[in-house]
Image (cartoon, helix red, strand yellow):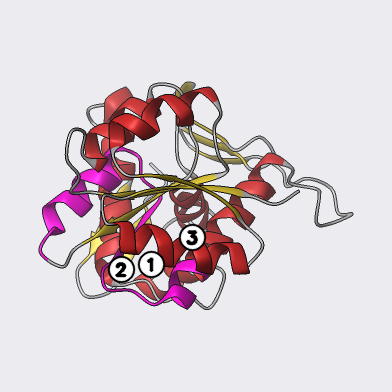
Amino acid sequence: MAAVIALVDDDRNILTSVSIALQAEGFVTRLYSDGEAALKAIVETPPDLCLFDIKMPRMDGLELLRRVREHSAVPVIFLTSKDEELDEALGLAMGADDYITKPFSQRLLIARIKAILRRAELMRTPDAASDEPAAEPIVRGRLEIDPARHMVSWDSKRVTLTVTEFLILEALAARPGVVKSRNQLMDAAYQDDVYVDDRTIDSHIKRLRRKFREVDPEFSAIDTLYGAGYRFSGE
């Protein structure tokens, strides 16, 4: 069954051009010109992935994401302008899976969409693409990761992560104490030939820390090695 993509943008040229490109790749598209028009439909009939512009009238993309996250963990990619760095970071902190900066190539956008949909499907059905047994849980001190169920806990308290956050954490926890460069974390979380800049990985790490500190204000198990990358300390 074709994946359904909800595109929310007040620029009708973008709605039209992106929709044509997505339909050419076999996706089904639902188009909305503002957040208020999109919210009810997305909550009642969730698509497989959403593309949200940040700057929109009536309800902007950040508020739309906040409202959607009250009901659904559907993957979300933000479409942003080059002058919206703070909004990008805030959007990731609120639970977006990725962002892409305008102007963007249709090829790059489609590659990002396919990568996130593929990862989301693997998390829902971890054995669908392989006859191998499901991966065993990873236990690192107070951290427990269950790849088969896409579940993470700290001190037995559930931590809810997006697909991208989960894969970054899994890559770090797989080898405690070993420094992972941003490029290595990009490879773990974006397993396709998709360019992601350093800011995206840094934003995901900040969001991971924030989510763990919501269950443990003293959480400090993800270290920054300036100029080198990140590591899980295995505390």
Q: Secondary structure at mark 3?
A: helix
Question: Where does the C terminus fall, quadrant-wise?
Answer: top left
Residue labelled with disc 1:
179
Residue 69: image x %, image y %? 38, 29
- Image quarter of residue 85: bottom left
Q: Amino acid at mark 1?
A: Val
- Can you tell which quarter of the image residue 118 is in? bottom right
10 with respect to 6 (left or right): left
Please report the residue visible at 22 percent of the width from the left and 27 percent of the height from the top: 217
Tell me the crowding category of disc 3: few under 14, some 14 to 19, or many 20 or more residues within 10 angstroms, Cα based: many
Say which label, 3 or 2, has the lower sequence index.
3
Neighbours of disc 1 within 10 Å: few (<14), some (14-19), many (20+): some
The answer to whether the residues at label 1 and label 2 have Cβ atoms under 8 Å apart is yes
Residue corresponding to mark 3: 19
Q: Is residue 76 magenta?
A: no
Please name the residue that numbered disc 2 is placed on.
229
Name the foreground residue: 10 vs 146: 10
Label 2 element class? strand
